[in-house]
Image (tube, grey):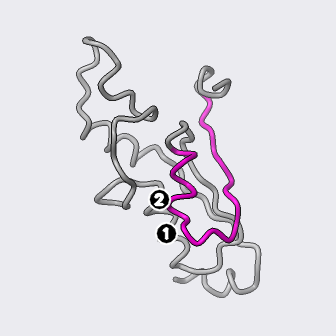
Amino acid sequence: LAAERRGVPTLVRIGYGYQNIIGHAQKFLVAGAQGILLPQCENGDEVRQIVDAVKFPPVGKRGLAGERWNNWGITGEDDQTTLAERVEESNKNSIVGIVVESQKGLASLDE
Protein backbone atom coordinates (compact mmCIF):
# COMPACT_ATOMS: atom_id res chain seq x y z
CA LEU A 1 0.00 0.00 0.00
CA ALA A 2 2.84 2.42 0.73
CA ALA A 3 4.15 2.18 -2.84
CA GLU A 4 0.64 2.46 -4.28
CA ARG A 5 -0.10 5.61 -2.28
CA ARG A 6 3.03 7.24 -3.69
CA GLY A 7 2.42 6.16 -7.29
CA VAL A 8 5.35 3.73 -7.33
CA PRO A 9 4.73 0.55 -9.33
CA THR A 10 5.11 -2.68 -7.38
CA LEU A 11 6.74 -5.79 -8.80
CA VAL A 12 6.62 -9.17 -7.14
CA ARG A 13 9.28 -11.83 -7.62
CA ILE A 14 7.32 -15.05 -7.32
CA GLY A 15 8.76 -18.30 -6.07
CA TYR A 16 10.20 -20.80 -8.49
CA GLY A 17 8.84 -24.29 -9.08
CA TYR A 18 5.09 -23.72 -8.95
CA GLN A 19 3.24 -25.97 -11.36
CA ASN A 20 0.41 -23.45 -11.55
CA ILE A 21 2.28 -20.23 -12.40
CA ILE A 22 -0.96 -18.48 -13.37
CA GLY A 23 -2.66 -19.15 -10.04
CA HIS A 24 0.44 -18.28 -8.06
CA ALA A 25 0.93 -14.94 -9.83
CA GLN A 26 -2.77 -14.08 -9.75
CA LYS A 27 -2.94 -13.59 -5.99
CA PHE A 28 -0.29 -10.85 -6.14
CA LEU A 29 -1.93 -9.13 -9.13
CA VAL A 30 -5.32 -9.10 -7.40
CA ALA A 31 -3.62 -7.55 -4.36
CA GLY A 32 -2.41 -4.67 -6.53
CA ALA A 33 1.00 -5.61 -7.95
CA GLN A 34 1.64 -4.08 -11.36
CA GLY A 35 4.06 -6.75 -12.46
CA ILE A 36 5.55 -10.15 -11.86
CA LEU A 37 9.15 -11.33 -12.10
CA LEU A 38 9.65 -15.03 -12.82
CA PRO A 39 13.00 -16.33 -11.55
CA GLN A 40 14.94 -19.24 -13.01
CA CYS A 41 13.12 -19.08 -16.34
CA GLU A 42 14.45 -21.81 -18.60
CA ASN A 43 12.30 -21.92 -21.73
CA GLY A 44 9.70 -20.25 -23.89
CA ASP A 45 6.84 -22.23 -22.34
CA GLU A 46 7.54 -20.66 -18.94
CA VAL A 47 7.63 -17.20 -20.52
CA ARG A 48 4.28 -17.81 -22.22
CA GLN A 49 2.79 -19.02 -18.92
CA ILE A 50 3.80 -15.88 -17.05
CA VAL A 51 2.53 -13.63 -19.86
CA ASP A 52 -0.77 -15.55 -19.74
CA ALA A 53 -0.89 -14.96 -15.97
CA VAL A 54 -0.27 -11.21 -16.09
CA LYS A 55 -2.04 -10.09 -19.27
CA PHE A 56 -5.75 -10.13 -20.06
CA PRO A 57 -7.17 -11.53 -23.31
CA PRO A 58 -6.41 -11.23 -26.13
CA VAL A 59 -2.75 -10.96 -25.01
CA GLY A 60 -2.92 -13.44 -22.11
CA LYS A 61 -5.36 -15.57 -20.15
CA ARG A 62 -5.73 -13.65 -16.89
CA GLY A 63 -9.21 -13.90 -15.43
CA LEU A 64 -11.36 -10.81 -15.25
CA ALA A 65 -13.57 -9.45 -12.49
CA GLY A 66 -14.14 -6.13 -10.77
CA GLU A 67 -11.17 -6.29 -8.42
CA ARG A 68 -8.82 -3.95 -6.60
CA TRP A 69 -6.53 -3.47 -9.61
CA ASN A 70 -9.23 -1.69 -11.58
CA ASN A 71 -11.60 -0.19 -8.99
CA TRP A 72 -14.32 -1.04 -11.48
CA GLY A 73 -17.74 -0.31 -10.15
CA ILE A 74 -16.58 1.63 -7.08
CA THR A 75 -14.82 4.70 -8.47
CA GLY A 76 -17.81 7.02 -8.46
CA GLU A 77 -19.87 8.95 -10.97
CA ASP A 78 -16.99 11.07 -12.30
CA ASP A 79 -15.10 8.08 -13.69
CA GLN A 80 -16.54 7.11 -17.07
CA THR A 81 -13.80 4.61 -17.94
CA THR A 82 -15.19 1.37 -19.32
CA LEU A 83 -13.97 -2.03 -18.22
CA ALA A 84 -12.60 -2.62 -21.74
CA GLU A 85 -10.53 0.58 -21.45
CA ARG A 86 -9.19 -0.52 -18.07
CA VAL A 87 -8.21 -3.92 -19.49
CA GLU A 88 -6.42 -2.26 -22.40
CA GLU A 89 -4.60 0.10 -20.04
CA SER A 90 -3.62 -2.78 -17.77
CA ASN A 91 -2.23 -4.80 -20.67
CA LYS A 92 -0.17 -1.80 -21.78
CA ASN A 93 1.17 -0.99 -18.31
CA SER A 94 1.57 -4.33 -16.54
CA ILE A 95 5.10 -5.66 -16.37
CA VAL A 96 6.30 -9.17 -17.08
CA GLY A 97 9.89 -9.88 -16.18
CA ILE A 98 11.92 -13.04 -16.44
CA VAL A 99 15.22 -13.86 -14.81
CA VAL A 100 17.47 -16.26 -16.70
CA GLU A 101 19.84 -17.92 -14.24
CA SER A 102 21.14 -21.05 -15.95
CA GLN A 103 22.92 -22.29 -19.04
CA LYS A 104 19.70 -24.06 -20.05
CA GLY A 105 17.85 -20.75 -19.91
CA LEU A 106 20.55 -19.02 -21.97
CA ALA A 107 20.39 -21.77 -24.58
CA SER A 108 16.61 -21.28 -24.86
CA LEU A 109 16.61 -17.50 -25.42
CA ASP A 110 15.58 -17.84 -29.07
CA GLU A 111 12.33 -19.56 -28.09
User: Left of 48 or right of it: where is 65?
Assistant: left
- The three-letter amino acid code for the residue at tag 2 is Ala
Residue 9 inside the magenta-drawn segment? yes
Residue at the farthest right position? 102
User: Left of 105 or right of it: where is 76?
Assistant: left
Picture coordinates of residue 71, whole percent (x, y) = 39, 27
Q: Residue at x 65, y 48 (%)?
A: 12
Q: Is residue 69 above or below residue 17?
A: above
C-alpha span from label 1 to label 2: 6 Å
Residue indicated by mark 2: 53
User: Left of 13 or right of it: where is 49?
Assistant: left
Picture coordinates of residue 33, whole percent (x, y) = 57, 41
Picture coordinates of residue 106, whole percent (x, y) = 69, 82
Quarter of the image for residue 15 reads bottom right
Q: Is residue 97 above or below residue 31?
A: below
Residue 3 inside the magenta-drawn segment? no
Picture coordinates of residue 28, whole percent (x, y) = 58, 45
Q: Residue at x 30, y 57 (%)?
A: 57
The answer to whether the residues at label 1 and label 2 have Cβ atoms under 8 Å apart is: yes
Point out the stretch of residues depicted in magenta. 8-29
Residue indicated by mark 1: 49
